[in-house]
Image (tube, rainbow, N blue to C red):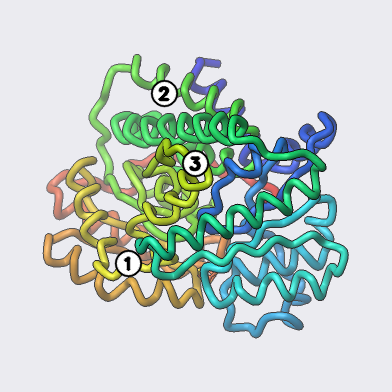
């Protein structure tokens, strides 16, 4: 097995079995905090000496969450609630729930009702993000979370520990940004599902181990000679693009992912936490710096422009948006984004998915048609039948 295959196998194992990292942290005597999306700074949990794991729901649905959410709520919330009800999160020492959208605002209450003993820490992120008042409010929220974490662990979070954690997570961000650029240059070696696994592993693996593996992977990729990828190149956008069958469908149609503006992937790693005198001040700045995603208010509507810039930078042929069904934030972004991309003659495919859903026949047909349309446009004469087999995989839910 080559170095690259070996590193990818380790990252893939981390992505497919997120609870192994939790078991290990518990065995080492560390408390574990579940972190619900979006954009809570994991540095604070790490500085408290705890292990953070991101919770994105997923998995099968028995319908039990229907007593808490009506059927028209998004699958991410629905399956998160299902996992609460089936006890998947019972061993967590606490859960941090940011309140980015209306559904997430209800999650805290629903969770408490379903599991009265669970330690739930809510975080109210200001909707208007870039004013001094919003910043001061976010600092205050982070202090409140820190106090709750200190109560759970029985130890104080020191400024020194926070600075160390900030440096570690910034290093992880840099490694993932470099990986994204290198994966675009080596699209022939990094299939869509492998690229996704590198990001997904960060949701549960210890940051130290994940960063070390991604840095090794980056170095190994940088040493490879570059071969022009013969198929179609796209940039992905959405909240979460985790469906293994969708990623395999891309691969089967000769489509490589050469960049993304996806919340669960690059959007989270685009900006470092700044080094300021007060580490709470530094962490609060993270929410202000988020750009081009539906869950963070953007009066300038930059998402389409940022995607267009990424398409140009990476030499992509088009954009694929995986929109979570019933997510209003995503739905509101589509018309403006579509207009901005059309104005620059960039093709957009919008697929509405349940989170981690098996790609439907209809989605598969639309991906194939998109690949053929882009193949004609780019003059490559690319044919989906020329493409490789997909690398199907299964995974546990985080
Ligand atoms: S997918 Fe949309 S509706 Fe669902 S939790 Fe995320 S932001 Fe809220």
In the rendered view, does 228 fall on the left or right side of 333? left
Q: Position of residue 115 (x, y in %)?
A: 84, 68
Q: Which residue is mark 3?
A: 278
Q: CA distance from mark 2 to mark 3?
A: 32 Å
In the image, residue 155 sits, relative to residue 260, either above or below, namely above
The image quarter containing residue 135 is bottom left
User: Is residue 390 visible from the viewing direction of this image?
Assistant: no
- Depth check, mark 1 against mark 3: the one in front is 3
In the rendered view, does 50 fall on the left or right side of 265? right
Q: Farthest residue toward the front?
A: 277
Q: Which residue is mark 2?
A: 218
In the image, what residue occupies the spot 82% across and 72% down?
Answer: 114
The N terminus: image quadrant: top right
Q: What is the secondary structure assignment of the residue under circle 2?
A: helix
Towards the viewer: 336 or 71: 336
**Does the CB distance between marks 1 and 3 fall below 8 Å?**
no
Q: Position of residue 301 (x, y in %)?
A: 26, 67
Q: Which residue is mark 1?
A: 298
Q: How many marks?
A: 3
């Amino acid at each position: 097995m080559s170095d690259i295959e070996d590193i990818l196998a380790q990252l893939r194992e981390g992505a497919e079995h997120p609870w192994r990292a939790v078991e290990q942290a518990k065995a080492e005597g560390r408390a574990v905090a579940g972190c619900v999306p979006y954009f809570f700074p994991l540095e604070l949990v790490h500085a408290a000496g705890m292990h953070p794991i991101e919770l994105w729901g997923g998995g099968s649905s028995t319908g039990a969450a229907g007593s808490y959410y009506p059927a028209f709520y998004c699958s991410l919330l629905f399956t998160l609630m299902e996992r609460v009800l089936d006890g998947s999160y019972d061993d967590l020492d606490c859960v941090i729930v940011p309140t980015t959208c209306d559904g997430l605002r209800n999650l805290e209450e629903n969770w408490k009702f379903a599991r009265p003993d669970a330690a739930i820490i809510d975080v109210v992120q200001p909707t208007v993000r870039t004013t001094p008042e919003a910043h001061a409010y976010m600092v205050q929220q982070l202090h409140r979370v820190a106090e709750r974490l200190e109560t759970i662990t029985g130890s104080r979070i020191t400024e020194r520990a926070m600075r160390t954690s900030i440096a570690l997570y910034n290093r992880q961000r840099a490694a993932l940004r470099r990986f994204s650029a290198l994966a675009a240059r080596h699209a022939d070696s990094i299939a869509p599902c492998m690229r996704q696994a590198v990001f997904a592993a960060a949701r549960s693996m210890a940051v130290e181990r994940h960063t070390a593996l991604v840095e090794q992977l980056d170095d190994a990729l940088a040493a490879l000679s570059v071969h022009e990828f013969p198929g179609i190149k796209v940039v992905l956008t959405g909240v979460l693009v985790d469906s293994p069958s969708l990623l395999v469908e891309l691969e089967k149609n000769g489509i490589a992912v050469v960049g993304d503006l996806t919340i669960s992937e690059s959007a989270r790693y685009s900006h470092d936490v700044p080094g300021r005198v007060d580490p709470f001040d530094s962490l609060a700045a993270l929410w202000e710096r988020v750009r081009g995603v539906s869950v963070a208010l953007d009066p300038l509507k930059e998402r389409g422009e940022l995607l267009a810039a990424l398409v140009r930078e990476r030499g992509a042929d088009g954009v694929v948006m995986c929109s979570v069904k019933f997510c209003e934030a995503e739905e509101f972004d589509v018309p403006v984004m579509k207009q901005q991309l059309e104005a620059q003659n960039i093709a957009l495919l919008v697929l509405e998915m349940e989170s981690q859903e098996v790609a439907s026949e209809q989605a598969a047909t639309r991906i194939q048609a998109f690949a053929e349309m882009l193949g004609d446009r780019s003059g490559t004469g690319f044919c989906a039948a020329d493409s490789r087999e997909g690398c199907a995989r299964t995974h546990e839910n985080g």
